Amino acid sequence: MNELVTGDAVVLGLRPARLPSRALAIAIDLAVLLTVFLLLSIGLAVASATLDEAATAAIAVATFLLVLVGGPVAVETLSHGRSLGKLACGLRVVRDDGGPIRFRHALVRGAMGMVEILGTFGVVGCIASLVSARGRRLGDVFAGTLVVRERVPAGRARAVPPPPPWLVGRFAQLDLSGVPDGLWLAIRQFLTRMNELDAAVGGPMAERLSSDLTACTGVPAPQGVPAAAYLAAVVNERQARDIRRVVATAGRAPGSAAVSVTAPVPPPVDGSLSGFPRSEVRPEGGGAPGKAASPSSNGAEGSRPGPAATGFAPPA
């Protein structure tokens, strides 16, 4: 897995930058640095016209190191990993645990950049970035850093469809501590795209994810409940617990007001689960097919939402 994991075993939602965006950012930085270097070299050459050849060469070497090595190090240290090129491309340099870089990280990256970027015209850096699973060059490997994307298109985010109302709250006692983050991510990605999948592909995929989830929880899925509906109900329960945990933590803070929270209700998702098996299980409590069982503990009754409201077909 390529996710960023903190020291507290928390997976960060950061996307590593790939070679094209990194190459464009480096090209912008090099253009700026070379411009500054040329202007400074011309000024120093005019000012040191009366000096001997050895002094002129020493000034040229010092100018090269100061601008092309010290410049990127100073900029990345002061801006916490955002040079001009990275700022233009929406990139940032962070530590392996997702924290901001410091002077030592920038120094190692700058020193290695002289070898793999300036010394080999970027060939070594390109090869290292292509070979690395997270697009890191040698400077990132030695410094323990990673270049990530700060600007991610918001239009790609999709809402997870809500579960059928008769499954909301049914898994309140389920132990979810043993479910890995990679499985949660796979389930979420499947639920947000299940209506785009063919029935011959989506059905077995849902069954496989359901089997992996039951193996982690140690509790088998209810009989007769479609695998996709079971996955959506468990994800809804996890979201409800996360919200209750956050609210409880905020409620213990000094001066905070008491806040009550209920299970989250995701936004409606258009479309139905065409191709997925329909549930033959009646709602809890033995209600008739024409009436909906209580989705929560408030005991309210009402008409059951149709497939367009939840994305799942109600039981027959």
Image (cartoon, rainbow, N blue to C red):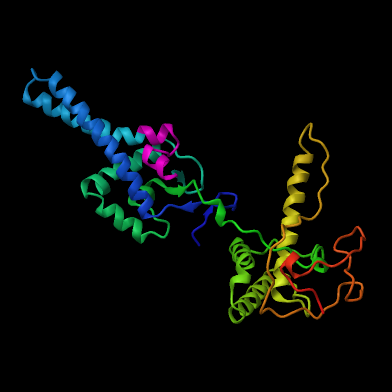
Image quadrant where residue 75 sits: top left
Task: Specify whether residue 165 is painted magenta.
Answer: no
Residue depicted at x 78% and y 39%:
252
Image quadrant where residue 190 sits: bottom right
Please give the count of numbered marks on the rendered protein: 0
User: Residue 280, position in %: x, y?
Assistant: 80, 81
Residue segment shown in magenta: 74-90
Assign the magenta stretch its main secondary structure: helix
User: Residue 214, position in %: x, y?
Assistant: 70, 72
Residue depicted at x 42% and y 48%:
147
Judge by depth and name the residue closer to the eye, 124 or 88: 88
User: Residue 210, position in %: x, y?
Assistant: 67, 74
Left or right: residue 314 versus residue 154 is: right
Left or right: residue 217 versus residue 52 is: right
User: Residue 265, position in %: x, y?
Assistant: 76, 57
Task: Specify whether residue 77 is painted magenta.
Answer: yes
Residue depicted at x 8% and y 17%:
50
Q: Is residue 204 above or below residue 237?
A: below
Left or right: residue 70 versus residue 234 is: left
Judge by depth and name the residue closer to the eye, 289 or 263: 289
Residue depicted at x 77% and y 50%:
244
Q: Is residue 222 above or below residue 236?
A: below
In which quadrant of the rendered image does the C terminus lie?
A: bottom right
Q: Is residue 12 above or below residue 269?
A: above
